[in-house]
Image: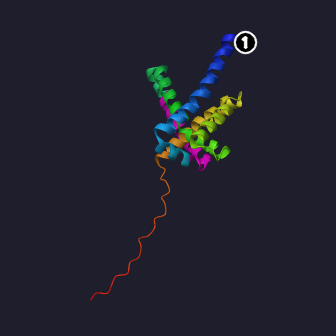
Amino acid sequence: MLFSTVSIYLSIALAFVIGLPALWMLQRGLWPESFEKKLAVSQTSLLKTLLIGIIPVVIISLIIAVMAQRLGPIPGLLLSATILAWGFAGAAGIASLIGARLWPTGEPWRQSRNGGLVLVCCALLPMVGWFLLLPLIAVLGMGVNVRSWFFKPKSAVATPPPLTVDAPAV
């Protein structure tokens, strides 16, 4: 293996290790309401989220196939890169969930950062991480994004108004 080949693989791994947790921290900082929805969705059934995430993958794959037939490969590559980034952005809730479970007493942004690093480092495992975990993270992120559109936060229990006793009419 040539040095240039090793350098390219190392650069790609480094880009994932730095880029994805940074994307998740950016999302936490810029869009806190959306982030909290994604975190709440991630705390529910991940299997249901995975199954819902497969729906956009299938739809976008069909669109990319049609686009490649009619317009060539470049628009399909741009669309697939955009959808992949959207999927990875949705995984912010999963990363924060992992961090909150591993470091329950830490600050929330540190939990997100540390959980993101754990998630990305697991995805760097040769073969299993590259071809199973990394696409799984993207599909789960798509499912989190779709479920967060329809997520209604549990409302706090409303306290009934105090009972008042009316004075008798004189």
Q: Residues within 10 Å of mark 1 (few under 14, many from 20)?
A: few
Q: Position of residue 93 (x, y in %)?
A: 56, 42
Residue 50 lies within the magenta run: yes
| Vertical position of residue 45 compared to residue 64: above or below | below
- Residue closer to the observer: 77 or 166: 166
Most extreme residue toward the left is: 170
Q: Position of residue 77 (x, y in %)?
A: 50, 23
- Residue closer to the observer: 111 or 50: 111
Q: Position of residue 147 (x, y in %)?
A: 51, 46
Residue drawn where x is 50% and y is 32% of the image: 83
Does the image show residue 55? yes
Q: What segment carries the magenta color?
A: 41-64
Q: Secondary structure at mark 1?
A: loop
Figure quadrant of residue 12: top right
Residue drawn where x is 58% and y is 37% of the image: 139
Most extreme residue toward the bottom is: 170
Quarter of the image with the C terminus in it: bottom left
- 103 left or right of 148 in image: right
Residue at numbered disc 1: 1
| Vertical position of residue 3 compared to residue 120: above or below | above
- Residue closer to the observer: 135 or 3: 3
Residue drawn where x is 64% and y is 42% of the image: 98
Quarter of the image with the N terminus in it: top right
| Vertical position of residue 74 compared to residue 46: above or below | above
Does the image show residue 54? no
Residue drawn where x is 54% and y is 42% of the image: 143
Q: How is the image coloured?
A: rainbow
Q: Position of residue 36 (x, y in %)?
A: 51, 46
Q: Amino acid at mark 1?
A: Met
Residue 97 lies within the magenta run: no
Dominant SS of magenta comes to helix
